[in-house]
């Protein structure tokens, strides 16, 4: 596990398990965050307590006040957020998976439809924008918190810089797996990091019990996967026509390929994603191609490109139709990864 991402999660779990006494989770609104330090650390106070249930769907509770060091910004909450704007599918789906759909005042920049399991129980979402929203529609909702999938979702050109939001009394949180702090190398992701991220989100949003249940379910799913890759090589094709954008050696794609027993052709690239040349892909001649299916760049359009491109049409995987497909939202670190890799394993097992 990447210990630098969540160094204090174990302390959080210990504090909650002990049921230490402290402030009521319903007594005050969420406090804004202010910049300080670096890393991603969850620190409950010495007097933290498990308060009443927060949110819908048996979300559970955690101790407040709570301080989280998130992408270099210190965020302190005195209670669970109540009006959340969620940006990107990873953020929206985490809240829904934790049973907090009733607290989502607005959502934006979804990467595709919700998975059936989440859509069945989710309340109707107030969709602000198909892309990163600007400040005006976000602030019109009078949120007390913004949960972003990418750091770029919290900028002057989008929902607002974190200092500015804090000055308005609006807290903010970025998916820790998307943090790209200056001077800090990207660390290799594994499923324990993903589970730690779910645990931290549960603490931040007042749904620790729901998070613990979700982690247990997802850990069982991952442990039940039979690697069917057999050491075959794979190319994770995310997007691009002239220049293919691929899953590299440190992020969620590598994590899932490792679980499947596949050898990533870009495993030596020390980043989460990489721009390649088609010459590099052709020279590697991967046994399997994993296609990311997005509304703006579908898996079918990728198949058509590979079959029509003079350089790639003769690759073994293209000729023999050895493709695996997953939704875009499942390709980024989050609550979709466990089910996604289980589905990919099933697809892999029946490839020619």
Image (cartoon, rainbow, N blue to C red):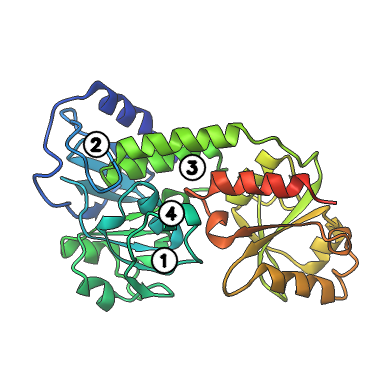
**Distance between the alpha carbons at the discs numbered 4 and 1:** 26 Å
Which residue shows up at 18% across the image and 31% down it?
48
Camera-nearest label, 2 or 4: 4
**Can you identify the residue that label 4 sits on?**
118
Identify the mark at residue 152; answer none if there is no mark: 1
Quadrant assignment, res 208: top left
Identify the mark at residue 62; answer none if there is no mark: 2
Q: Earlier in the sequence, mark 4 or mark 3?
A: 4
Q: Earlier in the sequence, mark 2 or mark 3?
A: 2
Horizontal side of 261 relative to 120 (left or right) equals: right
Camera-nearest label, 1 or 3: 3
Q: Earlier in the sequence, mark 1 or mark 3?
A: 1
Quadrant assignment, res 297: bottom right
Q: Position of residue 21 (x, y in %)?
A: 14, 26
Is the residue marked by circle 4 packed among few (<14), some (14-19), or many (20+) residues within 10 Å?
some
Which residue shows up at 33% across the image and 65% down it?
124
In the foreground, 266 or 95: 95
**Can you identify the residue that label 3 sits on?**
194
Q: Is residue 146 visible?
A: yes
Is the residue marked by circle 1 packed among few (<14), some (14-19), or many (20+) residues within 10 Å?
some
**Distance between the alpha carbons at the discs numbered 2 and 4:** 23 Å
In the foreground, 120 or 203: 120
Horizontal side of 271 relative to 217 (left or right) equals: right
**Distance between the alpha carbons at the discs numbered 1 and 3:** 21 Å
């Amino acid at each position: 596990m990447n210990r630098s991402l969540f160094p204090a999660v174990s302390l959080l779990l210990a504090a909650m398990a002990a049921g230490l006494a402290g402030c009521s989770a319903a007594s005050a609104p969420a406090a804004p965050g202010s910049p300080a330090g670096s890393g991603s650390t969850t620190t409950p106070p010495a007097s933290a307590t498990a308060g009443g249930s927060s949110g819908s769907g048996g979300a559970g509770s955690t101790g407040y006040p709570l301080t989280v060091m998130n992408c270099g910004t210190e965020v302190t909450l005195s209670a669970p957020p109540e009006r959340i704007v969620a940006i990107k599918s990873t953020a929206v789906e985490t809240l829904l998976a934790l049973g907090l759909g009733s607290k989502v005042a607005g959502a934006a920049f979804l990467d595709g439809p919700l998975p059936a399991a989440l859509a069945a129980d989710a309340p109707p979402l107030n969709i602000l924008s198909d892309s990163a929203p600007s400040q005006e529609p976000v602030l019109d909702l009078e949120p007390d918190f913004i949960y972003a999938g990418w750091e770029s979702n919290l900028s002057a050109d989008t929902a607002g810089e974190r200092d500015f939001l804090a000055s308005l009394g609006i807290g903010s949180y970025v998916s820790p797996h998307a943090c790209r702090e200056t001077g800090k190398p990207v660390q290799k992701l594994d499923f324990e990091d993903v589970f730690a991220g779910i645990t931290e989100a549960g603490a931040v949003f007042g749904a620790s019990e729901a998070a613990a249940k979700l982690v247990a379910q997802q850990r069982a799913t991952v442990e039940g996967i039979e690697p069917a890759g057999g050491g075959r090589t794979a190319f994770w094709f995310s997007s691009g026509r002239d220049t293919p954008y691929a899953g590299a050696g440190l992020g969620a794609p590598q994590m899932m390929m490792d679980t499947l027993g596949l050898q990533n052709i870009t495993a030596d690239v020390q980043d989460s994603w990489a721009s390649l040349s088609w010459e590099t892909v052709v020279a590697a001649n991967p046994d399997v191609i994993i296609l990311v299916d997005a509304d703006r760049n579908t898996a079918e359009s990728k198949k058509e490109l590979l079959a029509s491109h003079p350089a790639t049409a003769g690759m073994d995987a293209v000729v023999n139709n050895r493709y695996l497909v997953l939704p875009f939202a499942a390709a980024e670190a989050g609550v979709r990864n466990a089910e996604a890799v289980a589905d990919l394993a099933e697809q892999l097992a029946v490839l020619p």
